[in-house]
Amino acid sequence: MWYPVARNAIQGKTISFPSNGRNIWRQFAMKQNKRVLFLAVIVLFGFFSFFFQESKLPFAETSDARYCEIAYEAYQFGDWLVPHQNRMAHITKPPLVYWLIAAGYAVFGVNETGGRFFSGLLGLLCALLMFFLACFFVDRDIEAFLAAIIFETCPLIIGAGRIVTTDIFLLFFMMLAMYGFLKLYSQSTNPGTWVFWLALGFSGMVKGPIGLVLVGGIVGIFLLIERDVETLKKLSNPLPILAFLVLAFWWPIFIMAKVPGAFHYLVVEQMLSRFSSHGFGHPQPFTFYLYLFPATIFPWTIPALEGVFHSVRTKRSWENVMLLCWLIFPIVFFTIPSSKLILYVLLSVPPAAILAARFVYHGSYQGTLLTYVGTESLLIGAALIWWINGLDPAEKKTALLIACFLLISNLLSILVRKYHVATVLTTAVKVLTVMTLVMHLVGLQPLKYINTAKPLAKALNAITSPNPGAIPVIWDGFIARSLTLYTGINPLETKVDNETLPEEVKKSPTVLPPRTLWLMLKNNVPLLLIRKNQDKRPLPGRLTRIWIDQRYSIFTNITPCPVPLGSDS
C-alpha cells in the first residue's frame, strides 16, 4: 500500500495516498477526537462528583480534620519529615499525603478548598485512569467511557474524593500499578514494569506496604491461575524493584531511627494488632463488606452483580479471570482482620465498574432488564423513604420531589422497546440520580449533618479575641482536630488518643495532666474548657458554661464571664 507513495516521493512525482490509507488516518483521527470528547465528559462529571460546592462542607471529624491538621502543622512549622498532630509526633502514615495537602494550603490558603483540593484531584485522575484501564477489558471506547462514568458516580468513590483520607491517594497509585501490569501482560512493553514498580513505590509513601500486598496479591493469584511464568520473569527486573524499595521504605527506616518506639508502634500496634480479636480501633463483624460494599456502589450494584454472574457463566478468558481476581481479593483480604473500614476496599470498585459497564452496554443481557429495573426501583424507593424520614420538615418537600422524579424516570425505561435506548435511559437516570443527590446534600445545612467543630471554633475565636490570655482545654480526650485549622491555636488536652506514642505524651507541650489542671484552676489561670454534651461527668473546680451547641459546650473560670450563655447551631 505504501510502496507507490514512497516511490513517487523519491522520483519527485505527485504523491497520492491510497484511499484505504486515507481511511486509516481518518479513522485514527476520529478515534482520537472521540477519546478527547469522552475524557472531557469524564472531567465534567468529575467536577460535580469531587469539587462541586466543596468549600461549603466544613472539615469533618475525625479523619478529614485530622489529616488536614497534621498537614497544617507541617506547613506552619516546617517539619516535613516527622508528621505532628497537636504538636505530638503522629507517625501512623508516611508524609506524601501531608505534603500534597500543604501544597493545597500554599495555593488556596488554610481552608476547606486548600485541604481537599488534591483529594478531589486524585479522585478525578482515578476516573480518567479508569477509562484507560477499562480499554484492556472491553472492545469499544464507549464501554470504557461508561465504566469511567460508573466509577466516578459510585457513592463510595465520591465520598473518598470529597473527604481527606489516604485511601483515594492510595487507590490512584494502585490503579496506576494495575495499568502498568496490564500494559506489560497484554502488550509486553518494558515501560509497564517500571510503571508497576514506581506506582507501588509511591503507594508505599502514602500508606506503607499495603499497596504492594493488595496489587501483588491480585497479580500473583492471576498469574498462578494462568500459569504464566514469563510475565513474572519480566516483573522481576531488579532496577525497577530497587526503585520501589527506595521509594517505599526510606521513610519507615528514617522514622524508626528518628522517633523512639517507632518500630514497635508501626509493626506491632499498627500492623499486627489489626488481625487481633479486637482490631485497631475499627472492629466490625465478619460479614461487614458483604452487605456494605454492594450498598456503597449503588445504583450500580445490580449491573455489577450481573456482570460477575455473566463472567462466571461465559467462556473462560484472561480478562474475566483478572476482573474476578481484582474484585474479590481486596474484599476477602480485609474480611480476615477484625479492624474494617469501607474505604479499605476501594480497589474493588474499578473491576465492579467495568463489569457493570459490560452489563449495561451489551444487548445480550436484554432478558434481565425488566427484573433489573424493577428491583432497583424498589431499592431506590426504600432507600429514599429511609433517608427522607431523617430530614427536617422544611427539607422533605424538595427531597420528595427528587425521589418521585427519579423513580418515575427509572420505571419509564421499562416501556422503551429498543434495548439500547432503554440502557441509555437507565444509565442517564442513574447518573442523574447521583448528581442530583450530591447537589441536594451539599445544599442542606452541613453543620447539622456533619460532625464538625467549626461552630465551636467560631465561638472560641469570639471569646479569645477580647481575652487573649484564655487557654482552650479539651476535656478527657475527645477529638476536635479542626479547632486548630479554624483558630490557629493548639489546644491543651487532658487525655490523648491511642494513636499517640507514649514517649510523645511525656514531652508534649499540649498534654495537660490532671494535677496540673487542678493547679491552674486553683491559681485562677483563665481557662476555656471544652466538653462533649454527652459527657455528664462532673468537671473540676467551679466552672460556668458560657456556650453550647448540638455537640459541644464551653465552660470557663473567667469572671466576669466573657460572653453570656448562648448557643450556635
Image (tube, rainbow, N blue to C red):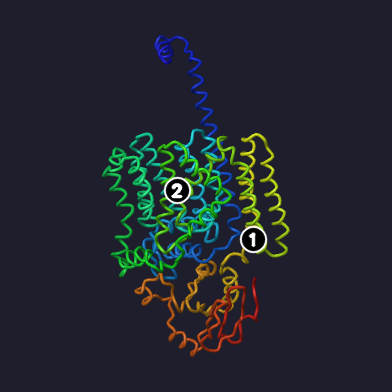
Tell me which corner region of the image, top left, top right, bottom left or bottom right, holds residue 414.
top right
Tell me which corner region of the image, top left, top right, bottom left or bottom right, holds residue 97.
bottom left
Up-down relation of residue 165 to residue 563 (above or below): above
Pick the quarter of the image with the C terminus. bottom right
What is the residue that sits farthest to the bottom in this orientation? 522
Residue that numbered label 1 is attached to: 386
Pick the quarter of the image with the N terminus. top left
Q: Which mark is residue 338?
A: none
Please state the horizontal and vertical placement of residue 41, each as a whole percent of the image: 57, 41
Disc 2 secondary structure class: helix
Residue that numbered label 2 is attached to: 327
Name the residue: 41% across, 49% down. 174
Front in this rendered view, residue 256 or 87 = 256
Please state the horizontal and vertical placement of residue 26, each as a whole percent of the image: 52, 23
Please state the horizontal and vertical placement of residue 376, each as a whole percent of the image: 61, 49
Q: CA distance from mark 1 to mark 2?
A: 29 Å
Front in this rendered view, residue 239 or 287 = 287
Is residue 370 toward the left or the right of residue 475 in the image?
Answer: right
In the image, what residue type sits under mark 2?
Answer: Leu
Q: Characterize the local packing of mark 2: few (<14), some (14-19) or many (20 or more) Cα atoms within 10 angstroms.
A: many
Q: Earlier in the sequence, mark 1 or mark 2?
A: 2
Up-down relation of residue 263 to residue 53 (above or below): below
Front in this rendered view, residue 435 or 514 = 435
Is residue 442 toward the left or the right of residue 472 in the image?
Answer: right
> Is residue 489 visible in this depiction of the protein?
yes
In the image, what residue type sits under mark 1?
Answer: Trp
Please state the horizontal and vertical placement of residue 385, each as a whole percent of the image: 66, 59
Tag 1–tag 2 contact (CB < 8 Å): no
Is residue 409 toward the left or the right of residue 450 in the image?
Answer: right
> Is residue 125 visible in this depiction of the protein?
no
